Image (cartoon, helix red, strand yellow):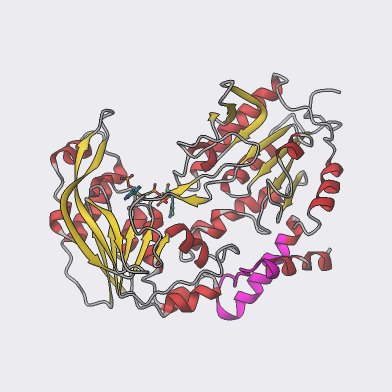
Amino acid sequence: MNAPGTPENPLRVAIVGSGPAGFYAAGHLLKVKDHVVQVDMYDRLPTPWGLVRGGVAPDHPNIKSVSRVYEKTAQHPEFRFYGNVDFGSDVGHDDLTSHYHVVIYAVGAQTDKQMGIPGEDLPGSWAATEFVAWYNGHPDYCDLEFDLSSERAVVIGNGNVATDVTRMLALTREELAATDVADHALDVLAESGVRELVVLGRRGPAQAAFTNPELLELGEMTDADVFVDPADVELDPPSREWLEGEGSMTAKKNVEILTEYSARKPTGKPRRIILRFLVSPVEIVGDGKVEAIKICRNELHRDDSGALRARQTDDTETIPTGLVFRSIGYKGVPLPGVPFDERRCTIPNDRGRIVDPERDAPITGEYAVGWIKRGPTGIIGTNKKDAQETVDLVLEDLAQGRLLEPQRPDRDAVEELLRERRPDHVTYAGWEAIDRRERERGEPHGRPRVKFARMEELLEAAKDADLVK
Ligand code: NAP
């Protein structure tokens, strides 16, 4: 048979994961000129968009609107979506390599990093990722029960997820009610007893991972005043030197914003957001539930590579609280049949080509994009360039004849396999039916949508696709 990419033998690509990285990869592939490319995208959920649906905060509708770009990709006649199909149990690695010339893993980072401190698993201590998935209506998390009666909540970490969690705990009922926050979370959040949110950064203001707009939002909350201790924005000499030298524009602006916050006087809003720096949690304390968090003061030092790192001191303090959110980053998990780098929690790869660690050589026809390729960093748009890098390698390998030679490359073979393995898989038309129903539910309340959060509801709504066909 001739090389794939022709009308008689299209280049067949499977993408596992339908978040931004997967969709950018699909978009780039379907725009390739001179080759006929067909993309089948799999997701274990009946809904696409990954963290755009399940991660981006409900009060950030503009960020969510990036899904319009993915909708356009999905309209391409050579694109198919197979939701509610779990890689590993419904279809496996060998199923994909026997049906496709190319397999791209775009599964993101599906769990959270652990702090490794005593008390981390006490009731009342949550991974921010769990809270985020819960308020966004992810079916795996919709039954979690958050007790928000504690007057003080502590958020650990200085990234954008920490700002999302902090904002969500400080929005007014009216603000929440205008969003697509999951219905089960709306009342719990609106009736929360949290009055003080303490956000802990282990390094200084110059090293915070917040982006500027997200940090600015914390100072513009309707219901919360923001507090920064002026002593905390006095930069230590290594930070000042770094900021004045190689420091990024984002870091410079963050320090400027935090300095302005430190000069603010409280305006008497009902909630307080307190941003603290150079402190690390050493223990979450409590008898059967969180009652306090013990933190220590840090100082910065340069490690062997020259990076500024936090070093703990003996200066400790205990903050009473019933609620802790650990927002210290997401973490990738291994996929059955696919190599995994346990240290970096990514799939070992060279610019996107998956590498067999034993042979230290690329695995034919298998690629990675997004967070499972590079780790959980960057904003949504970062994945566009990342996906382009991987797709360029796919095309290079296509030109060199270095792709898989599947036994059953025809499109119908996949449908047959799925009918057998997962008869209730959800097609793109099924997702469109879910989307339509959710929007209709939101309309009378002036909300963008009211999400279905339970698996049964999602699958039921997807069935409407058959009615409109
Ligand atoms: P992140 O940006 O990597 O931030 C993680 C934070 O946790 C850092 O401040 C880090 O401090 C701290 N940390 C790590 N280990 C710690 C420990 N053991 N003890 C105390 N602190 C610790 O991660 P993220 O907030 O989960 O966000 C993930 C990515 O998604 C980021 O690229 C983010 O920008 C993006 N995102 C964007 C948006 C948006 O654009 N609106 C919203 C949400 C997320 P160190 O710096 O000292 O390591």
Residue 83: which quarter of the image? Answer: bottom right
Magenta-colored stretch includes residue 455: yes
Which one is nearer the viewer's eye here, 112 or 80? 112
Which one is nearer the viewer's eye here, 115 or 375? 115
Q: Quadrant of the N terminus?
A: top right
Residue at 67 percent of width and 42 percent of height: 15
Magenta-colored stretch includes residue 464: no
Q: Position of residue 188 (x, y in %)?
A: 46, 77
Residue at 21 percent of width and 61 percent of height: 261
Q: Which stretch is magenta?
A: 431-457
In the drawing, does residue 314 fall left or right of residue 95?
Answer: left
Residue at 56 percent of width and 59 percent of height: 53
Q: Position of residue 208 (x, y in %)?
A: 29, 48
Q: Is residue 449 visible?
A: yes
Furthest-top residue in view? 400
Q: Is residue 65 visible?
A: no
Residue 443: which quarter of the image? Answer: bottom right
Name the main secondary structure of what is drawn in magenta.
helix
Relative vertical location of residue 104 with respect to residue 72 in this rendering, above or below: above
Furthest-front residue in view? 287
